[in-house]
């Protein structure tokens, strides 16, 4: 391949994860010629899910992984239990992909650099944000008002849900609007019992099955879920939404897609005369060769932090502090939900009840705080919600049990006591002081490393404290004996819902993007991943990123077709 | 007697050549000790026990690799502690059982924080991990079904015949 060739495309999409796949699909389906650039390796659907069908005893380390390798290459990624011997290839090698944090403010940055990005390893929980979320900033004055409302995004939620497939139960709750659902997965008897008790004791609190992109009905090229809960290995049934199972085949089918993996976008190129992005500079991650591609429009979908970092390093005479950063807020108002294990409790009874199959979703208890016209009588603004579920212990309980011999073995053969776990996610307040910066260190490609300056604040702490107390009360309704309960936020990043940094807003003086995810400063630059978020809600965010991406892509495609870009 | 470190290096080589479970150590006394302890924890019943499925070899590899932040030094120390009053390997089966039962009692009933108790908690855990992730432990002693194709939320347990699912990952991960 010559390094001199410059190819013209209508659109360049940076990143092939959850949002990049969506941008590529929508833009190609609108007839645009799209170049999709992905820094990581190619992962072929099915064929490359090499550990998918492996039993623990077929792996060298029985699923626990090579501890020496994990210590050396995955010390950060292995903090999340999703990483194991089956899945670690879908997470970044920490040694090869370093980043920095401000002293005393640790941040856990969980990433997957490969075709499909984190769509391969995500938890698949899929929730709409409600009207209250798009009004939150204007209500309590943190951050800037969203330039959109729920009505603007609702049709795009429909559009995305119908395509990716979401199973869930309608509940008619304004704070967690219903979507276009496939039939829900079932609650187990302990979860059903808690739902019933909540209805009785706290009518405003609802326990419902987790809404998830594990499909319960077939979709083109995809089979219904087989109830294995090993999704992060990759699923050759295509039963959960990933780029590979869903958006990439659709984009490829148009004949308008060019995909380049192992291609790191180093910088965006800006033409100050035309006030437009002209294209991108890339590095071939295998050979180190550099080249550039040009296009009419660029979509940044590299994941919130990487999209912001790319803008920060794409400086020019016009934009010395980062691309499209005339407002000076680029990198600021960065957020991640504050999470904690609000409760882990043993539930007495239900001894005769067990389940068959391994359900790949838990339950959710949506937000119930501060939803009214006037705030609740609590010490924090906004709210929190819970995810978790009930399950029966298995052999693993033996590690805390006395006993030896036949009796011990026979006991461990049976399902153990029921447990209920609830993790709380508290909304992260947008703060100017929480930000993504460039460090003065570079990585092996000579690209500046990201520097995080982030910490959870008092509001998050108070919300989580209450969440833990309320969780204890709730499980006690079904006799739960509390074993663990924490209101202390996990380290920043551990919710893996990092967002903000290039927020949307109504005013170009205090925001980076307009209501169409288009840079105020540069009309052919769109940022449609989590970087665009102006607030964080307390729901998992990826569905919202997808909806914004689809909406922005349709808007941009019109502009390109009309010759406006 | 070979020192533990050398023996582990040997194991390590065979681990790299094949897999940890196929490592062998001949008549090494550490392996002998582990075999006895393994079988005291998980004996053969209708299904083979921990010794029969090779958990001892697996533990040597896992310990050398640092699983549960343990080390070969710790394993060696535990073996020494087992012989505090009388050499463990020279004891009768009944005595061995008493020695281990006393340690288990101290660790899990009295919740003692002494060195033996703390080490025992780690190695007991490793025995369980090694056994219940083996083919026999996971799929004969417990129920293993990688592709259930169904989720039935409420199944009545028929006394004595319903086995726990070894591949209920939520249960395994959250413990
Ligand atoms: C274990 C886990 C569980 C999660 N669970 C949930 C959940 O249940 N629900 C939910 O809503 N969210 C969940 N998330 C978060 C979710 O994965 C992310 O919000 C989502 O993937 C973001 O999509 P994205 O397209 O912005 O980024 P990603 O999916 O991360 O994709 C970004 C892609 O861009 C590539 N890239 C980065 N920089 C460059 C560059 N300079 N040049 C070229 N390519 C680049 C990356 O390699 C990557 O492939 C979870 C995440 C993890 C890790
Ligand atoms: S649980 Fe469902 S989606 Fe997940 S890997 Fe199994 S079949 Fe695929």
Image (cartoon, coloured by chain):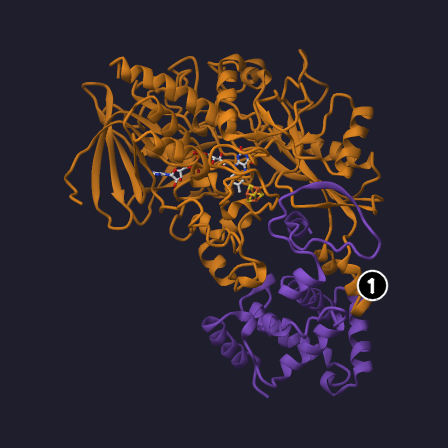
Residue shown at 65% from the left, 43% from the top: B150
- Which residue occupies the foreground of this view, A332 or A336? A336
Residue shown at 65% from the left, 71% from the top: B53
- Give the x, y percent position of residue A465: 69, 33
User: Which color has been applied to chain B in this rendered view?
Assistant: purple
**If the picture is divided into quarters, which one holds ligand 2?**
top right
Q: Can residue A432 be seen in this view?
A: no
- Give the x, y percent position of residue A238: 50, 40
Where is the N terminus of chain A found, in terms of image quarters?
top left
Give the left or right position of residue A230, taking residue A69 as reference: right
- Give the x, y percent position of residue A511: 41, 19
- Give the x, y percent position of residue A565: 26, 17
- Which residue occupies the foreground of this view, A118 or A506? A118
Occupied quadrant, residue B81: bottom right
Give the left or right position of residue A448, taking residue A343 as reference: left
Q: Is residue A318 above or below residue B68?
A: above
- The mark tally for this picture is 1
- Which residue occupies the foreground of this view, A326 or A390? A390
Q: Is residue B18 visible?
A: yes
Q: Is residue A276 above or below residue A420?
A: above
User: Which color has been applied to chain A in this rendered view?
Assistant: orange
- Which chain does the residue under circle 1 lie in? B
From the image, tell me which residue sits under label 1: B110
Occupied quadrant, residue B118: bottom right
């Amino acid at each position: 391949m010559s390094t001199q060739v410059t190819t013209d495309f209508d659109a360049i999409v940076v990143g092939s994860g959850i949002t990049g796949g969506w941008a590529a699909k929508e833009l190609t389906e609108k007839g645009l010629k799209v170049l999709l650039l992905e820094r990581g390796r190619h992962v072929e659907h099915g064929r490359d899910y090499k550990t998918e069908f492996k039993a623990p005893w077929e792996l060298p380390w029985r699923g626990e992984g090579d501890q020496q390798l994990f210590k050396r290459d995955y010390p950060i990624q292995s903090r999340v239990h999703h990483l194991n011997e089956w899945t670690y290839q879908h997470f970044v090698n920490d040694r090869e992909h370093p980043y920095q944090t401000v002293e005393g403010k640790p941040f856990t940055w969980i990433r997957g650099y490969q075709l499909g990005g984190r769509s391969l390893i995500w938890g698949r929980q899929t929730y709409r944000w409600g009207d209250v979320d798009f009004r939150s900033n204007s209500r309590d004055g943190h951050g800037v008002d969203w330039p959109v409302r729920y009505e603007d995004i609702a049709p795009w939620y429909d559009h995305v849900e119908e395509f990716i497939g979401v199973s869930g139960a309608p509940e008619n709750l304004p704070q967690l609007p219903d979507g276009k659902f496939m039939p829900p997965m079932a609650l187990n008897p302990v979860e059903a019992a808690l739902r019933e008790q909540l209805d009785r004791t706290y009518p405003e609190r609802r326990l419902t099955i987790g809404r998830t992109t594990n499909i319960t009905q077939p979709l083109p090229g995809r089979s219904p879920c087989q109830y294995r809960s090993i999704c992060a290995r990759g699923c050759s049934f295509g039963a959960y939404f990933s780029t590979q199972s869903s958006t990439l085949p659709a984009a490829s089918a148009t004949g308008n897609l060019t995909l380049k993996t192992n291609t790191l976008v180093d910088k965006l190129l800006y033409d100050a005369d035309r006030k437009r992005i002209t294209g991108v500079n890339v590095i071939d991650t295998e050979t180190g060769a550099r080249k550039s591609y040009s296009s009419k429009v660029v979509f940044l979908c590299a994941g919130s932090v990487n999209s912001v970092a790319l803008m920060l390093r794409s400086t020019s005479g016009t934009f010395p502090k980062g691309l499209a950063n005339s407002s000076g807020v680029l990198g600021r108002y960065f957020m991640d939900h504050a999470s904690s294990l609000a409760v882990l409790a043993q539930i007495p009874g239900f001894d005769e009840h067990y389940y068959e199959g391994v359900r790949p979703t838990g339950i959710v208890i949506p937000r119930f705080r501060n939803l009214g016209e006037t705030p609740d009588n609590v010490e924090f603004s906004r709210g929190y919600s819970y995810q978790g579920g009930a399950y029966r212990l298995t052999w693993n309980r033996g590690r805390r049990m006395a006993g030896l011999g036949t009796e011990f073995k026979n006991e461990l053969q049976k399902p153990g006591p029921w447990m209920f776990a609830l993790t709380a996610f508290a909304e992260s307040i947008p703060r100017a002081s929480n930000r993504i910066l460039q460090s003065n260190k570079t990585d092996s490609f000579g690209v500046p490393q990201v520097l995080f300056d982030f910490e959870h604040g008092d509001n998050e702490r108070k919300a989580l404290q209450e969440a833990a107390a309320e969780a204890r009360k709730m499980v006690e309704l079904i006799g739960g004996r509390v074993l663990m309960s924490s209101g202390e936020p996990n380290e920043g990043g551990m919710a893996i819902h990092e967002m903000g940094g290039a927020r949307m807003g109504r005013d170009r003086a205090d925001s980076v993007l307009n209501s169409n995810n288009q840079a105020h400063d540069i009309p052919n630059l769109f940022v449609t991943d989590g970087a665009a978020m102006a607030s964080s809600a307390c729901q998992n965010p990826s569905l919202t990123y997808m909806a914004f991406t689809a909406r922005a892509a349709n808007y941009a495609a019109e502009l390109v077709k009309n010759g406006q870009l | 007697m070979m020192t533990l470190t050398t023996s582990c290096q040997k194991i390590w080589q065979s681990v790299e050549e094949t897999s940890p479970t196929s490592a062998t150590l001949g008549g090494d006394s550490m392996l002998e000790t582990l075999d006895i302890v393994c079988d005291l924890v998980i004996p053969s019943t209708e299904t083979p026990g921990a010794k029969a499925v090779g958990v001892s070899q697996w533990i040597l590899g896992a310990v050398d690799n640092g699983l549960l932040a343990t080390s070969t030094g710790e394993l060696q120390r535990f073996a020494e502690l087992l012989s505090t009053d009388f050499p463990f390997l020279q004891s009768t089966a009944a005595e061995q059982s008493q020695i281990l039962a006393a340690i288990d009692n101290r660790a899990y009933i009295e919740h003692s924080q002494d060195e033996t108790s703390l080490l025992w908690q780690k190695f007991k855990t490793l025995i369980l991990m090694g056994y219940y992730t083996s083919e026999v432990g996971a799929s004969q002693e417990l129920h293993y079904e990688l592709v259930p194709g169904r989720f039935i939320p409420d199944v009545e347990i028929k006394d004595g015949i319903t086995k726990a699912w070894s591949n209920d990952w939520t249960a395994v991960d959250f413990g």
